[in-house]
Amino acid sequence: GVGFPPFAPPRHFITSCKRFLGLQFHSQQGGRLVVDHMDRAVLIAISHVGIERHLLDTAVMSRQCQAEAEAIRRKYRGKTIIVGMDELTRLKGVPLKLLAFERLLAEVPYYRNRVVFIQHGLHTLQHQLTRMAEAELLGVPLLEQELAIQREVVEVKELCERINRVYGPVVIFKEYGPHEWPSVESRAAIWRAADIMVCTPVMEGLNLLPLEYAFCHREPAGVVIMSEFSAASRVLNGAIRINCYDMEEISRAYDQALCMNADERNARRDRDCGYITNRSSATWTRNIILDVEAGIQGDLQAITSLDKDIIQGSEYHSVVSFENIVLEGFCQPLLSSDVLEKYTKCSKRLILLDYAGTLAPRELGNLAVKRDFLGVSKRKLSPKISAILKLLCSDPRNVVFVISGNSTQVLSLAFAEILSDPSTPLGLVAHSGVMMRWGNVLKRGMASSAHAVGGAASSRNDVGMRWGRARSLIANAEVEQTEDEWEYMLPGVAQEWSRWTDAAEIPSILDEYTWRTGGSSWRQTEVTTSWQFRQADPEWGGIQAVALQHELEEAIANVNVPIAVTRKKHTVELLPKGVDKGKAVKHILEELRRHTGFVPAFCFCAGDDTSDEPMYASVLDFMGSRSAHPEDDSQERFGHAFTCTVGRKPTAAQYYVNDTEQVLDVIQSLSTVVVPAGYSPPPPGPLAGAASM
């Protein structure tokens, strides 16, 4: 077996095996990569070891640690402490962090008397011996050898002296000989005392010091600034990632860390602690050995060929190729003026919107460019989005639904302000169609079918009667409903879901893939299960997602439970069979027509990923079915449909916009259309199902 911490080095290793040795590789059950060489299968282990939690806990609570930490804080009382601890080698990039700190002090004078930078430099015997051996082979004299070894140290010292001459004693440089490195108790004291830790290597493999700092600094948590070229940056997802060559970016990261509030600090720390504390060296070693033994026994079968087509083709293609979901069709740019024109002319309108990635931007998946830490599920709905939705929902001619893959808790929290106002009825669909919340939407459907808005008492009575009858019809359909008005599309699924997943051993499969994919995680609700790799290496996460999907489908087929596996942007999701966003849209349209007589003449439907594709098909199918029945009342015909995706890509949607801001621009233009004075919608058709009551 060959082991690597992040995915980038094994990617280069596999490329070299392919190009120089002509070897193939494949994925085994459990997400293991294997390179076939002669009669052997070489396991490629991609997993970062974590910290020794019990050892660090003992060190943090020791008297030595507490005394040393208190001494550091007392010495620099009233100042924010930034710390660095690196080997004094060129690849560690120590001068880069100091240059960026110098730039921060020059651009922001406020910090000059409020921040102190303590850099701990560690001399390594191995590095010195290696440099001397290389010099000896090249015939370099002994004096020049010694000067070359000291060059890195001299550069760091000169930078520290230059900064201190200009701004006072703001940089403290401490050296440690090869056998004088700080003990675990002393390191814990340094971590406890420092508010920010900075690592700026230009290239780095295993380094557990940032992980130690994230664990040891508590209440509030510390902030880690990490170079994107460090292996640990793929493990510490709560760290601020920077390009170590960009002085301006590092300087901004210093400023961001210095201004960060306690809640965000703790949220970043909590995001990482579960991963780094559950991978002690013993646990990591045991899992690697088990993987090797499983491969030797031959119990695992290759299920996914990742490189077949590319090995047979050009060597200049990427070494990694995995299945992409390709949807037929094409789309054109959406013109908001066209949407607004049709919207204005229609008196019955349906607006269907995805949440994450459509109404609100998603957290970026690529770690190298990720800037939005909180993502969608941890953010409140922005005032702009809230105001637009309120205006749309307050128009009596509109029925508005947000159809999302998020949980009921996330949606209820995000849209709480709108849901609490009866004058702005908003429908919600959660878990990609598993659960639905009508709220006052059906009542809106009644109101839009009345003879006049706010008209005579007879109209109001008619609305009330039809509302009561509709609710009665839905109740008689044996719809399972929660206390907060959420309805299950499939009755009984909440009671069976856990049993189904256990029968297929899905939790154990997901644990395996989470272990092997740094930055991934999985969660299970009462009606869905999902594995997400948004914080993992994007290429490695994509490979694992393909392998995981195949393995889950095989496990589910073996026990024959009604679970469907879908793969979308950065997520593999398991849902009950028979539900998706398309079926949710179909259900909304049918229920509105059946129970309220509401048949939209206009529909705007927007989404951003593959899970939204069934929505577009359902909208267009409904439009076609209404147009195919000329005997229907002309007012019920579905006349104008706009299906739209965010980002240009193969899709079933008719139109596309470039980003979420354009989606907001479109619906904001719709929200400005006012209800005409004296507006009176057409008289309603007969209420379906009334004869049976």
Image: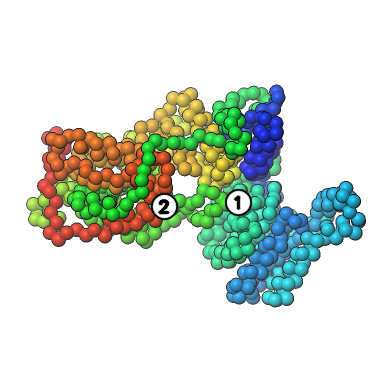
Question: Which residue: 23% across, 35% down?
Answer: 625
Counting from the top left corner in percent of width and height, residue 148 is at 83, 58
The residue indicated by pointer 1 is 236
Q: Nearer the viewer, residue 670 or 555?
A: 670
Q: Is residue 505 above or below residue 222?
A: above
Q: Is residue 600 left or right of residue 249?
A: left
Q: Residue 114 vs residue 151: left or right? A: left
**Exactly how many numbered labels are in the figure?**
2
The answer to whether residue 594 of the structure is visible from this angle is yes
Secondary element at tag 2: loop
Whether residue 468 is visible, yes or no, is no
Quadrant of residue 527 in the image? top left
- The residue sitting at 53% across, 39% down in the picture is 542
The image shows residue 512 at horizontal and vertical percentages of: 58, 36
Numbered circle sitting on residue 659: 2
- The residue most toward the right is 142
Quadrant for the N terminus, please: top right
Image coordinates for residue 356, horizontal then vertical, percent: 41, 49
Give 56 or 366, whichever is nearer the viewer.
366
Amino acid type, label 1: Leu
Q: Residues within 10 Å of mark 1 (few under 14, many from 20)?
A: many
The quadrant in which the C terminus is found is top left
User: Three-letter amino acid code at disc 2?
Assistant: Asp
Q: Are marks 2 and 1 in contact (CB under 8 Å)?
A: no
Quadrant for residue 587, please give it. top left
Distance CA(mark 2)–CA(mark 1): 28 Å
Q: Quadrant of residue 671?
A: bottom left
Residue at the location (19% across, 52% down)? 345
Q: Secondary structure at mark 1?
A: loop
Mark 2 closeness class: few <14, some 14–19, many ≥20 residues within 10 Å: some
